Amino acid sequence: MRSALLVSFLLGVSVLPAQSNFGPAVRTNLSAMRANPDAYQNVKVQFVVQFASLGRISNPFFTQFTPTEYTNFYGWADDQKLWQEKHYNDVFGMLFLSKSNTQLETLYTMGLYTRIRCTAVVRNTFQDIPWIEVLSFEVLGEKLDTAVLTHLHRGVGLMERRLWQRAISELSLAPGDGVPKAATQAAHKNLGVCLLRMGEPQAAIGYLQSAISLATGKDFETENLLAMAQKSPEKAIDRTVDSSKLSDSERPMWEAFETSKTSMPATRVLGR
């Protein structure tokens, strides 16, 4: 025991009882804890995580999180945009639940992307990574699924290729009942962008206003897009799309008016 305490002291690890009284939980998010783990060490916190999978405990240093006492699981922060590859691949694996916890069976049967509000304590930090013991959790109703992520991912990819109409077709399928606000907000924002690029500002305004209302904080980018749609929508039109690669249904609205001038036959004045 003395040697364990010595190792703990040298590594800056706190050995604390599993159920210490830390007072009210501090509301935060997993991204903030990962960015500044030392600020949260030995702090009781509450945050939402999206469940990824059960994990395998790794003990590179002295810690209370032994495989016989704790179950390890992986998850994403609630603000991570899982339809973007860099966010999806950035899964966090230092979440632990005691095997004596009454919610253990619920964790074992939890489905992919399930959102849970965790009450937890950052027990240790090691190599700028927080090791978090989850004391309890609450399963939330809204969650992502593979279909929603697929539509959002495809939509963003088509926007990068400036295939605005195809992107709209994908993004329109993403929002729905039970979809988290963050995903709906992203879909509505991108739909607004697509419609602006196609020269349909009135349709874009509704989606952009919805995206702003769903945002958790100030979204200056969307607010600027809304202002452009209301005051100078012509600046947002994508006039450099290669129309030869687009079908008629995918061509921007403005192109129909411009090409119609060259395709119309010359007006002939009939003689008396």
Image (spheres, rainbow, N blue to C red):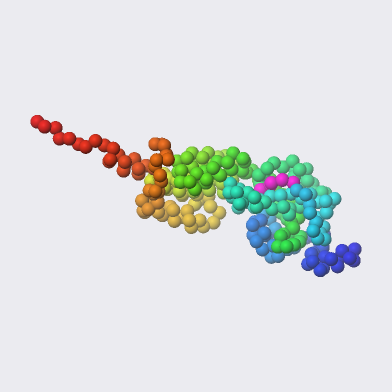
Q: Name the residue nearer the viewer: 56 or 185.
A: 56
Residue found at x 40% / y 44%: 242
- Is residue 98 among what the camera can see? no
Q: Is residue 146 magenta?
A: no
- Is residue 241 among what the camera can see? yes
Would you identify the image quadrant in which residue 217 lies? bottom right
Residue found at x 40% / y 51%: 236
Would you identify the image quadrant in which residue 40 lies? bottom right
Left or right: 11 as drawn, with respect to 179: right
Q: Kindly report the secondary structure that dominates the magenta region of the rendered protein.
A: strand
Left or right: 142 as drawn, with respect to 186: right
Would you identify the image quadrant in which residue 7 lies? bottom right
- Residue 147, image x and y in percent? 59, 39
**Which quarter of the image is occupied by the N terminus?**
bottom right
Left or right: 104 as drawn, with respect to 178: right
Residue found at x 82% / y 65%: 8
**Which quarter of the image is occupied by the C terminus?**
top left
- In the image, farthest residue toward the left: 272
> Relative to residue 121, is residue 10 depicted above or below?
below
Figure disc tally: 0
Q: Name the residue nearer the viewer: 145 or 250.
A: 250
> Relative to residue 237, is residue 124 depicted above or below?
below
- Residue 213, image x and y in percent? 50, 51
Residue found at x 41% / y 37%: 247
Write the start and end of the magenta stretch as one range.
48-54
- In the image, farthest residue toward the top: 272
- Residue 84, image x and y in percent? 58, 49
Left or right: 93 as drawn, with respect to 224: right
Q: Does the magenta stretch include residue 53?
A: yes
- Residue 235, image x and y in percent? 37, 53
- In the image, farthest residue toward the front: 244
